[in-house]
Image: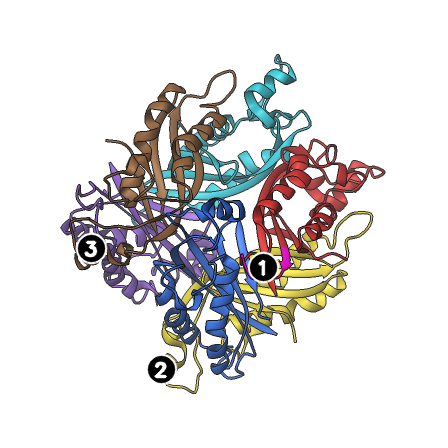
Chain colours: A red, B yellow, C cyan, D blue, E brown, F purple
Amino acid sequence: MTFIIRREHFSAAHRLFIPEFSDEENFEVFGKCSNPNWHGHNYILFITIKGEPDPKTGLVIHLRHVSKLIDEKILKKIDHKNLNLEVDFLQGKVPTSENVAIGIWNELAGDISRFGGTLHCVRLEQSENNIIEYYGE
Amino acid sequence: MTFIIRREHFSAAHRLFIPEFSDEENFEVFGKCSNPNWHGHNYILFITIKGEPDPKTGLVIHLRHVSKLIDEKILKKIDHKNLNLEVDFLQGKVPTSENVAIGIWNELAGDISRFGGTLHCVRLEQSENNIIEYYGE
Amino acid sequence: MTFIIRREHFSAAHRLFIPEFSDEENFEVFGKCSNPNWHGHNYILFITIKGEPDPKTGLVIHLRHVSKLIDEKILKKIDHKNLNLEVDFLQGKVPTSENVAIGIWNELAGDISRFGGTLHCVRLEQSENNIIEYYGE
Amino acid sequence: MTFIIRREHFSAAHRLFIPEFSDEENFEVFGKCSNPNWHGHNYILFITIKGEPDPKTGLVIHLRHVSKLIDEKILKKIDHKNLNLEVDFLQGKVPTSENVAIGIWNELAGDISRFGGTLHCVRLEQSENNIIEYYGE
Amino acid sequence: MTFIIRREHFSAAHRLFIPEFSDEENFEVFGKCSNPNWHGHNYILFITIKGEPDPKTGLVIHLRHVSKLIDEKILKKIDHKNLNLEVDFLQGKVPTSENVAIGIWNELAGDISRFGGTLHCVRLEQSENNIIEYYGE
Amino acid sequence: MTFIIRREHFSAAHRLFIPEFSDEENFEVFGKCSNPNWHGHNYILFITIKGEPDPKTGLVIHLRHVSKLIDEKILKKIDHKNLNLEVDFLQGKVPTSENVAIGIWNELAGDISRFGGTLHCVRLEQSENNIIEYYGE
């Protein structure tokens, strides 16, 4: 079993809150992450793809394809954006790291299959201390 | 499957030795880590918890709870301490990274269940070159 | 000459723009950093203080004092906040890394003198690729 | 289940190309990595070994043995070398990270068994953005 | 005094040797870095520019300009290349980190002046353990 | 002006205390760093040397010489040791990072001159958050 991992990063603003909750209730659940004026992060993203190296090229998948795919399906929509207001695949979700990682998985999984690999893990580091890994359902 | 990973760190002194061995025998087994006058490390600790994001909040577990739990059950006992002399859950154990990781697992696993998650991995980096991962029995 | 450096970090949202400019003009000057819906960063902050180690204690300055000072004068105002809207010492400034670093310098310099050290450098890493260092006027 | 991970690093030159392809075809497949005049990397290598801590010593395996083994079987052959021309266990292979990781696995797996552990993973970071993990067949 | 620092990276092959020396003499001077079949590194480059923030924009210099300049004058010539054979500004020099840093300085200093800043430092990390800083003559 | 920086690391135990003080007084001054049972750190050490690159070799100084010197004069005495009890050049000093950095400077400065360079800075990172830089008197 061979896995190839691509690291990317993006910067974004967000706010964790449930619209039907008051600011006090949201602060109770999400702490300072519910600040109504937003805050933001430098996110580090690791995309892990499973596959077999091609016997001729020695490559599981062409990283240029993966990189271009992540750029078009994810980074262009999410980098230097507001995760609550501007990202189509996060609409109606609280933009926790969990939900962002799941959203990225759903955007990428099908296309990676088309390139001959299998999406294995989306790892999202919101800060050096707080990390999410999602392996699909 | 969603995993949430919390990074913490602590600094501690220790000595690797087996009491019934001579200093020479201990040096044979543990090398310079058996120095009778102690040495120490900055340990980096990663606690991985498995769970399902709450559909409403998008959170696997409240990180504040995890963080407070790690602080009370682990860091207060272990940070700026002597692993051989002062840590209740390491008594009678050689404080190798293996045993420290297992000890931390045993301290945390039950309480994390009570918060609705499942402890999945304790990763302990004793230095940038030497790392232990423990996944339970 | 001895320097002591304390590393801290904070997460914040911001937008680079000049109010009297149109969105197009702001985009021309600031690129994607002028996104009207904000974006954000994990900032890493290094505060360098110059001083002489006390002959008795071997310390230039008590780090607990420095750390508490940075927490009260900077982090409480700036962490998980919006740099454009919520930070008193940045009012009326475009919150570029340059201006944030200068603002932090002005907040800290006087108080550090009172502790017997001299503020030497504010280093602000907005991302791993973009860094500002400010050494005072 | 306990895993011990050892981090090592080496620097090497390589070129990705298939001998029967023209330079243009190789460039099509491998991009700038097919530069005929070579290029190179600082590789970071993580060797993960699975085992049970010895009840007496608390050690899964003696890291000195692992470290010496990696040094003799891998680093002496590969560090400051040309991966295409000088490494016996890569002869006839395109030295992609995939093939280098697989080659390292094949060199180490047997000897690690002899020390009482089981080779679990070879992780090879060719750069901070491109990483391979190999877990055996 | 305000400094802005831009981090970039490139990968390259090189060999340290003096043509009129024998392989033995070169090995005596440069150790394993004189391997005739080349080796290589991931270089990390930090370009520090001194200047005054513009009172209106709060920027010392437009990072897009700096980034584009480094890309055109340095990275396009040096990334995934052979430092001995392919880089015009290193011709006739032993490609030690010292000489590469000085070469980069000479390529960039004039153009940075034209953008209104002053090149202050070229920092080149050949590995995490070996670093050069050059501040001009 | 060219500077060459060598990174090394060591692990050690220490305790910050003034012998004529009570445990309470030491705790008042040094906080948890005065724990009578010791604690420890992984220290990262950066040695900066100033010099001119040799016109023939392109080297400021032979890193092998520097590395061997640091190993013999510093690391053999200090790595996996107790800074209070076992290090000759720290006798009678409180082993704060300030005093350790100054002690390392005094051990190295003369020998580096003999190799044709000038010791410029000793940087000692006791943790990722607490760093000392010493530039001589």
Residue picked out by circle 2: B23
Q: Amino acid at mark 2?
A: Asp
Residue lying at the far right of the rendered structure: A20
Residue picked out by circle 1: A54
Residue picked out by circle 3: E26
Is the C terminus of chain F in the top left, top right, bottom left or bottom right quadrant? top left
Nearer to the camera, A27 or E1: E1
Nearer to the camera, A20 or A8: A8
Residue E56 in the image: state x and y as whole percent.
Answer: 51, 15
Q: Amino acid at mark 1?
A: Asp
Whether residue B76 is visible to the viewer of this picture, yes or no, is no
* Label 1 CA crowd tier, 10 Å (few <14, some 14–19, many 20+): few
Instruction: Name the secondary structure under disc 1.
Output: loop
Q: Which residues are magenta?
A: A49-57
User: Cα distance, mark 2 to mark 1?
Assistant: 54 Å
Mark 2 or 1: in front is 1
